[in-house]
Image: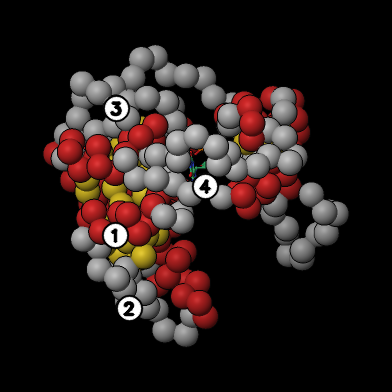
């Protein structure tokens, strides 16, 4: 065990970072996200670094059950591009995922998405977000404010990085307090962003940066295979070492 407070804190932070994960399972509908937990998560976000300290975000907290239900009724147009690119990055066994060190397991997705020529299913009812919001007590919609722009950053590239810092700070605090978090990129997708804009009265100059759901996980923790590339596969010492395309 580390014997100095600084090392204790560093070990603790390392564990939170290592254990932070996407919580994609159902939430325990009987447990809300408490006021102290929400405040700690927002406070962690507040201290995130942003370029030029522009704090280029606004956050809508949704915890009113009828608003959550209305969000769940929004329809997602889906994306053919997502299906194609998603397929290219899938692994079809745990061994393959561990070897690659990047991407996701195919079994996370519906069987119809696991073929090279996967098509959007346009038959039947349009897909709603109900499955993503079901049983979940809280959704955060993080809005990007392009008016709060760092100087001399083409395409506001730096501003977008700052939003990632905000996401990570909040995610680590949620993890540390035992609250599950899942990012839901579909909320910024075609159709959904407009629906959220009118439902939540979001001004037209703000864009959805990301949305996430927060909640206590229902039942026992589910084991997940989480992989990363080893350090020596992405770190280059003093000079970039070309290791072939991978
Ligand atoms: C910008 C961004 C967008 C993401 N979008 C989604 C998403 O739409 N749905 C989802 O389940 N996870 C999403 N994720 C989570 C990643 O898939 C996840 O972080 C990655 O697979 C590593 O798994 P881990 O979070 O469990 O470590 C997103 C993450 C980031 C940073």
Between disc 2 and disc 1, the foreground one is: 1
Q: Position of residue 102 (x, y in %)?
A: 66, 41
Earlier-in-chain disc, 2 versus 1: 2
Q: Are marks 3 and 4 in contact (CB under 8 Å)?
A: no
Between disc 1 and disc 3, the foreground one is: 1
SS state under label 3 = loop
Residue 78 has which mark? 4
Q: Position of residue 35 (x, y in %)?
A: 14, 39
Q: Are marks 1 and 3 in contact (CB under 8 Å)?
A: no
Q: Is residue 18 something one can see in this rendering?
A: yes
Q: Is residue 48 above or below residue 77?
A: below
Residues under labels 1 and 3: Cα distance? 23 Å
Mark 4, other Cα within 10 Å: few <14 / some 14–19 / many ≥20: some
Mark 2, other Cα within 10 Å: few <14 / some 14–19 / many ≥20: few
Of 182 and 166, nearer the camera is: 182
Quadrant position of the N terminus in the picture: top left
**In which image quadrant can residue 92 be found?**
top right
Residues under labels 2 and 1: Cα distance? 18 Å
For the point 25% across and 23% down, which residue is it? 29
Residue 197 has which mark? 1
For the point 22% across and 55% down, which residue is it? 200
């Amino acid at each position: 065990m580390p014997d100095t407070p600084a090392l204790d804190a560093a070990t603790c932070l390392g564990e939170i970072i290592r254990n932070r994960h996407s919580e994609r399972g159902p939430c325990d509908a009987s447990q809300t996200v408490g006021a102290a937990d929400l405040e700690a998560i927002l406070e962690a976000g507040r201290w995130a670094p942003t370029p030029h300290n522009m704090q280029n975000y606004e956050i809508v907290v949704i915890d009113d059950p009828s608003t959550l239900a209305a969000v769940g009724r929004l329809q997602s147009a889906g994306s053919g591009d997502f299906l194609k690119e998603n397929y290219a990055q899938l692994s079809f066994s745990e061994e393959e995922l561990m070897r690659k060190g990047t991407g996701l397991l195919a079994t996370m997705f519906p069987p119809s998405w696991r073929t090279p020529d996967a098509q959007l299913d346009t038959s039947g009812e349009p897909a709603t977000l109900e499955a993503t919001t079901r049983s979940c007590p809280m959704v955060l919609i993080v809005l990007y404010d392009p008016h709060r722009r760092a100087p001399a950053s083409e395409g506001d590239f730096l501003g977008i990085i700052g939003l990632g810092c905000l996401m990570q700070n909040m995610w680590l605090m949620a993890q540390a307090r035992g609250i599950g978090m899942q990012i839901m990129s579909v909320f910024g997708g075609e159709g959904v962003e407009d629906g959220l804009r009118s439902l939540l009265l979001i001004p037209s100059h703000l864009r959805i940066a990301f949305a996430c759901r927060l909640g206590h996980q229902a039942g026992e923790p589910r084991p997940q295979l989480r992989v990363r590339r080893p350090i020596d596969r992405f770190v280059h010492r003093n000079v970039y070492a070309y290791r072939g395309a991978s």
